[in-house]
Amino acid sequence: MFELGISTEQIMGFLLVFARVGAWVWLTPPFGGGFLPPLVRIMAGLAFAIPMTPGAIAASGGISLDPVNLLLQFALQVVIGVALGLVCLTLLSAVQSAGSIIDVASGLSLSAAYDPLMQQQSTVINRVYQLVAGVLILVTGAYLILFAGFAKTFEVLPIGNGLSLDVTAATLTSALSVAFVAVLQIAGPIIAVLFLADIGLGLLTRVAPTINIFVLSFPVKIGVALLLVGVAIPRLTPVIAGLTDSSVDAMRGIVGK
């Protein structure tokens, strides 16, 4: 009879590890958060769970095979993975959020107010920033730092241990604050220039009242926004590095390290 040499404890341990890894991968950019299709995220979670399983089982001191306890532990690992993924998503999505604000300030998102069918074309800078952030996380190796930080959670918070809700809530609040500051730092300079452009256009109407400022402001502000975004994109690398470090620190905070 052919035997794989895999025990029931190892199989259950892998499923528990996948519950935490899968939930984390589902949310964390660049793999989660809508960046990749659901099937790809599931396959990535399965692949990432395989090398983490032996260490996770060793750190837990053994996996209980009681059916009720396994169900509870599976649900707990999903909750832990969601909490870890949520702080990463909050921080690493700051770049994308900044793009949404720039879309609004530049007028690129106003098309959806007039024609709901154009909603997909109204988030140009948002989508550009989302793509750039995902590429930078992969190219700069930031994803390796995220994986290393996440893998440590199985040592600090082994399978079988609970999650502190107070610490998790405090960490999520802190992550929101850091993300808000990052959004201001990314989008603030561009919004300030667009505000100056509004002032300049307003002064232009005083000089030449016959100019239709409403029609003129759209191409001017959009052109200025796209130009500034082109200048800002090469300078996003240190921002991504800082947000990656903040994500790792937040994951450590959640698991209580």
Image (cartoon, rainbow, N blue to C red):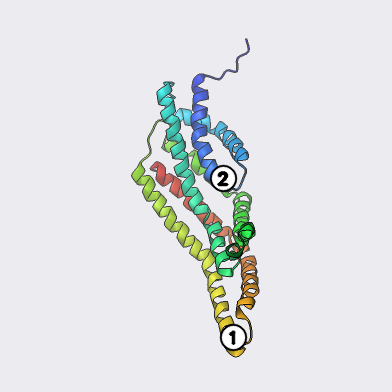
Q: Nearer the viewer, residue 187 or 244?
A: 187
Where residue 42 sits: x, y (%)? 58, 37
The residue under label 1 is which amino acid type?
Answer: Thr
Q: Quadrant of the C terminus?
A: top left
User: What's the residue at 60%, 55% (across, down)?
Assistant: 130
| The residue positioned farthest toward the bottom in the image shown | 207
What is the tally of numbered marks visible in this picture?
2
Q: Residues within 10 Å of mark 2 (few under 14, many from 20)?
A: many
Q: Secondary structure at mark 2?
A: loop
Is there any visible trace of residue 11 in the rendered image? yes
Q: Is residue 134 above or below residue 221?
A: above
User: What's the residue at 41%, 44% (across, down)?
Assistant: 254
Q: Is residue 219 above or below residue 28?
A: below
| The residue positioned farthest toward the left in the image shown | 166
Is residue 114 left or right of 21 when viewed as pictured? right
Instruction: Provide the residue designation for mark 1.
Output: 205
Instruction: Provide the residue designation for mark 2.
Output: 32
Is residue 34 left or right of 255 when viewed as pictured? right
User: What's the residue at 55%, 61% (across, down)?
Assistant: 100
Q: Residues within 10 Å of mark 1 (few under 14, many from 20)?
A: few
Is residue 98 left or right of 231 when viewed as pictured? left
Where residue 165 sits: x, y (%)? 36, 43
Q: CA distance from mark 1 to mark 2?
A: 47 Å
User: What's the residue at 56%, 59% (across, down)?
Assistant: 238
Q: Secondary structure at mark 1?
A: helix
Q: Is residue 22 above or below residue 240?
A: above
Q: Nearer the viewer, residue 209 or 172?
A: 209
The residue mark sitting in front, 1 or 2, is: 1
Where residue 61 sits: x, y (%)? 42, 26
Where residue 107 sits: x, y (%)? 59, 68
The residue under label 2 is which amino acid type?
Answer: Gly
Q: Nearer the viewer, residue 19 or 232?
A: 19
